[in-house]
Amino acid sequence: MLYSSASDWRAAPHRKVLVFGMSGLGKTHLSGLLRGSGDWFHYSIDYRIGTRYLGEAIVDNAKSEAMKVPFLRDLLMSDSIYIASNITFENLSPVATWLGKPGDPAKGGLPMAEYATRQEAFRQGEIAALYDTPHFADRAQALYGYDHFICDTGGSICEWVDAANPEDPLLRALSDECLMVWIEGDEAHTQELIRRFDRAPKPMAYQPEFLARVWQEYLTQHDCTEAEVDPDAFVRWTYAQALSHRQPRYEAMAKWGVTITPDQISALETQDDFVDLIANTLPA
């Protein structure tokens, strides 16, 4: 690991961490707390995907919808208005809206072929954004003068790595640059995430093999065609399975770093509290 002991971590002039785990367990909350201290640079993987790697596709998708409205089409064609994505660290809706959900077009669903194409574009964008981590860690210090750095990853990071391989290129690049920190939720946290998702289902990125399997299972179990699938019903049905699929992958990744919990994050008030928390996970 980047820091071999608590004393090494405390003495480091430039602390760098990468947090990973299920979406909704506190990665962005923690990053915001540290950013608010004024000493930490917050690098959001999802923000980077939405601005650098999928920015044009997201805006083009919005333009495509606007072009269906004659009033807006005339304004766009005459360059009288423009459409832009107002993505922020806290509001990643433009990315989620573009990613979409598969199923009945009358309910906002995408054909599976188009959905799979977008999934692949997101996968490539997320991997590229993760590989950008060392660049932004250097940039944060050299350009802006930040002493410390936190990489706030998306929930799907575990889908693109092989944590059992000690030479996995992506994990090697990330762990060489940052201390890997898993935010491990318990069963109660998982059930709360499922309840939240059931109230407001959101698009997700899936491992291609997992998506192909659950899609066929859903069509078979519900005896329906692709065009008959309720998009929200499908992603609700899939969500708990996706969490179960990801849990062992996160656990394998945890061996590359240290582990904290959502409850420990919620108890933090200052960056010093976070430094102490990480120190307590490392050897003395």
Image (cartoon, rainbow, N blue to C red):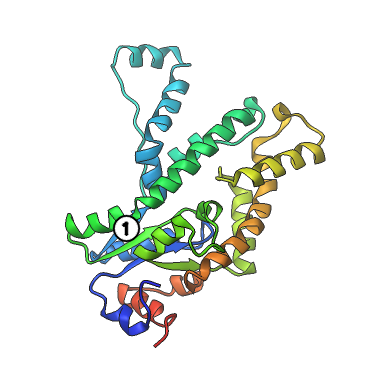
Q: Quadrant of residue 22?
A: bottom right
Q: Quadrant of residue 114?
A: top right
The quadrant in which the C terminus is found is bottom left
* Label 1 CA crowd tier, 10 Å (few <14, some 14–19, many 20+): many
- The residue indicated by pointer 1 is 42
Please determine whether, in this image, residue 58 is positioned above or below residue 253.
above
Q: Whole-percent x and y of residue 48?
A: 36, 46
Q: How many marks?
A: 1
Q: Is residue 95 visible?
A: yes
Between 252 and 33, the residue placed more toward the observer is 252
Q: Quadrant of residue 158?
A: bottom right
Q: Relative to residue 197, is residue 218 drawn left or right?
A: right
Q: Whole-percent x and y of residue 172?
A: 43, 61
Q: Whole-percent x and y of residue 2?
A: 36, 71
Between 93 and 49, the residue placed more toward the observer is 49
Please determine whether, in this image, residue 212 is positioned above or below residue 252.
above
- The residue positioned 36% from the left and 74% from the top of the image is 274
